[in-house]
Amino acid sequence: MGGIGRFFRGIFSFIGSSSSNQDRVAAYLIREHDRGRTMADILDDPYVLNRCTPPELERLLDRPDVIHAIGDDMAEARSALPGS
């Protein structure tokens, strides 16, 4: 029975990967914002652009931890999204 569990975990391992990727990008956004960088600069970073599509960035900016950390700069963040 243990082999079957490992088999299905291996097949569906991609499901959790985007979540952990988004967690890392969210932490990066929050950390860089705390350092005083503008959201436009942060969202243009290769680190962010290489890890998130524009729809993923929109979902990322809807996360409660990001909203709480960024707070007043949320309007700037929305306008800095690619395609906005």
Image: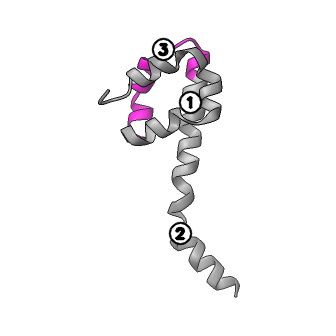
Near mark 3 (Cα within 10 A), the count class, few <14, some 14-19 or many ≥20, is some
Q: Which residue is mark 2?
A: 12
Return the residue nearer the eye: 81 or 22. Answer: 81
**Element at label 3:** loop
Residue that extends furthest to the left in the rendered view of this protein: 83
Q: Which residue is mark 3?
A: 38
Residue 20, horizontal then vertical, whole percent: 58, 48
Q: Which residue is mark 1?
A: 28
Q: Earlier in the sequence, mark 1 or mark 2?
A: 2
* 49 on left or right of 74: left
Q: How far apart, in angstroms, are the residues tagged by discs 1 and 2?
A: 26 Å
**Element at label 1:** helix
**Quadrant of the frame with the N terminus:** bottom right
Residue 70, horizontal then vertical, whole percent: 59, 21
Residue 4, horizontal then vertical, whole percent: 62, 84
Return the residue nearer the eye: 3 or 14. Answer: 14
Q: Residue at x 39, y 31 (%)?
A: 46
Region of the chain picked out in magenta, as a range? 32-52
